[in-house]
Image (cartoon, grey):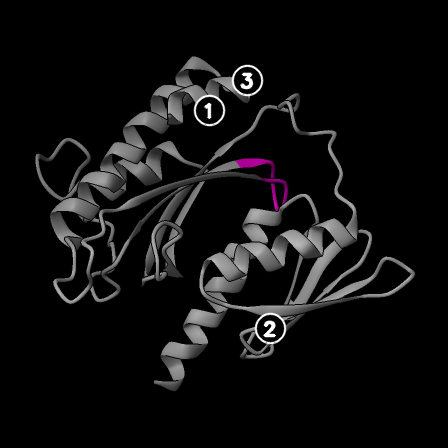
Amino acid sequence: MLASTMKSLALSEEAIDDGALAVSELVTNAFLHAGVPARFEPIRVPELWLWARTHPRKELVVTVFDTHRDKLPRLGTGDLLDSHGKGLGIVAALSSAWGCHPSRSQLGEPPIPGKATWFALPLPPSWPCSGRSLHSVVAAQRLLMLLAVRGFEGKRHSDLTGTSVVMAGGLKVHIDQDAFAWHNDDGTPCRHPLLDLQETAEHIICSLEAAGMARS
């Protein structure tokens, strides 16, 4: 799936090979080190998510979700040629950025808390969706749907100017003709282009999960 998606986005063969190797390392780590919590039924396996973002750079984001937050990925200190502990070093070397944050599953019911480990690869200037746009009201509707799938039911209000507000999980997200904007639980301001719908939803989920963890 990853290779075919990257090919459709006009990435080079080298980038496709890099992406395939990097995602295999993340999936292997998820199965070997994260496992599946016995308290959750039915048993969940790691999930693979893909989306494109335009901010801060045009990149393809590849994410592996698992249900263990207590086992965070760490870069090894050994050489990349070592036989053990090199997985995240390979991911870091092959990608333009990588990271890990609290999140929720997208598949199955109900959504399960866990963590998302991701890496990004640069998109070519001529990637097929580069010229697309999204109306603010449509963006608000879709954001509300994406949050609901993850277990955060909310409400939307839109006015005649095309400006909308989405309320979900204690966050108020303002949507105008250009961007999504909100403040995290710690007061940090966030702003993302409307085209970065999936990226925005994931940032909001991360903020809501982190706030919940801090209060628990």
Q: Position of residue 122 (x, y in %)?
A: 52, 31
Of pointers 1 and 2, the one earlier in the residue sequence:
1
Mark 1 or 2, closer to the camera = 1
The part of the chain drawn in magenta is 53-59
106 or 201, nearer to the observer: 106
Amino acid type assigned to the residue bearing label 2 in the image: Thr
Amino acid type assigned to the residue bearing label 3 in the image: Ala
Instruction: Relative to 181, say whether 35 is above or below.
Output: above
Q: Measure the C-alpha gap from mark 3 to mark 1.
A: 9 Å
| Residue name at image x 51 percent, y 39 percent | 51
- In the rendered image, the residue lying farthest to the right is 160
Instruction: Relative to 137, say whether 53 is above or below.
Output: above
Q: Position of residue 131 (x, y in %)?
A: 74, 29
Q: Quadrant of residue 184?
A: bottom right
Which secondary structure class fits the magenta region best? Answer: loop
Q: Quadrant of residue 16?
A: top left
Q: Horizontally, is 3 left or right of 139 in the view?
A: left
Mark 3 or 1, closer to the camera = 1
> Which mark is on residue 188?
2
Amino acid type assigned to the residue bearing label 1 in the image: Thr
Q: Horizontally, is 59 left or right of 36 in the view?
A: right
Instruction: Relative to 5, say whether 71 is above or below.
Output: below
| Residue name at image x 64 percent, y 51 percent | 142
> Which mark is on residue 5?
1
> Which mark is on residue 10?
3
Of pointers 3 and 1, the one earlier in the residue sequence:
1
